[in-house]
Image: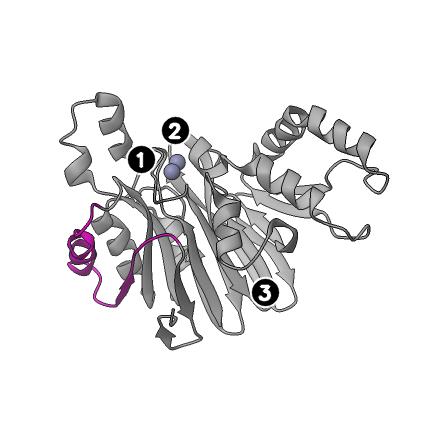
Amino acid sequence: MIEVTLLGTGSPIPDPHRAGPSTLVRAGGQIFLVDCGRGVLQRLAAAGSGANQVSALLLTHLHSDHIADLGDVIITRWVSTFDPDAAPLQIIGPPGTAEVVDATLRAFGHDIGYRVAHHADLTDPPRVEVHEYTDGPVWDRGDVRIRVAPTDHRPVTPSIAFRIEHGGASVALAGDTVPCPSLDALAAGAGALVHTVIRKDLIEQLAQQRIRDICDYHSSVQEAAATASRAGVGILILTHYVPAIAPGTQDEWRALAASVFDRQIELGDDLHRVQVHPGVCSRARP
Ligand SMILES: [Zn+2]
Ligand SMILES: [Zn+2]
């Protein structure tokens, strides 16, 4: 079984009730964070875990809303890991990730220096290993396998999606993307597809051109549902709602997806949790 928890379902616009985009995947005793938007570690704590338990951080692309709390993940993991032989944090992302991680470590250079000077048992800066990929297998440990494929979020390039497999269960996770054949292929036959969505019908009515611009490089609810349908997945899990789902309109969003995808559809608030079983798919009990 693979368990998916939507840690943050928000967008780049700060929202009092939704953290920035991030999804927690638990599989075979391993813990994966997919993207690390604003507030990720608060939500991870609410989900019963912490930065020092993360097996790998998977980044779909380098837009600020998806990496806003990268520094918090790296530094908090470092200061809350007490085993001197603990494995370095694994970070898997598209090309450019290593540059972003290096710059983040430099940005926190003063903090790292203070802590090394103050604590006798902290002698080294945070241990991080970065792996950059656009396609193919990226992880094979303890019965969990992960592979990636390119997505289409141009001009944000490259951007990638992940497919996590464990014990016959599988979950594909797309970041921001328009529909594309490489995502269809990656998600084909998966137990679940986690997909970011925007309501183009609402965004297109807004006055600011800069906001309307976002329609051309994201999937609408219907487009994400069509991807899920072509890929034949068991469950479509929607997240990163733009605009935020207004109170009382969740059924409207669900109906838009259901007009294109006739299987299980999941959406909701931060910490919404879905279990993905091999073959059979059922929602986790709260
Ligand atoms: Zn993006
Ligand atoms: Zn985004």
Give the vertical position of 110 relative to 89 (above or below): above
Element under disc 3: strand
| Mark 1 element type | helix
Label 3 environment density (alpha carbons within 10 Å; few <14, some 14–19, many ≥20): some
Q: Nearer the viewer, residue 178 or 40?
A: 40
Q: Is residue 12 left or right of residue 253?
A: right
Please state if 99 lies on the left or on the right of 243 as rendered: right
Q: Which residue is mark 2?
A: 155
Graded by Cα atoms within 10 Å as few (under 14), some (14 to 19) or many (20 or more), the crowding at tag 2 reads: few
- Going from N to C along the chain, the mark reached first, 1 or 3, is 3
Whether label 1 lies within 8 Å of ligand 1 gets the answer yes
Q: Which residues are magenta?
A: 246-270
Which of the two marks, 3 or 2, is nearer to us in this view?
A: 3
Residue at image coords 38%, 63%: 192
**Quarter of the image holding residue 190?**
bottom left
The residue that disc 1 covers is 217
- At label 1, counting other C-alpha atoms closer than 10 Å, the crowd grade (few under 14, some 14-19, many 20 or more) is some
With 153 as the anchor, is 137 left or right in this view?
right
Q: Quadrant of ligand 2?
A: top left
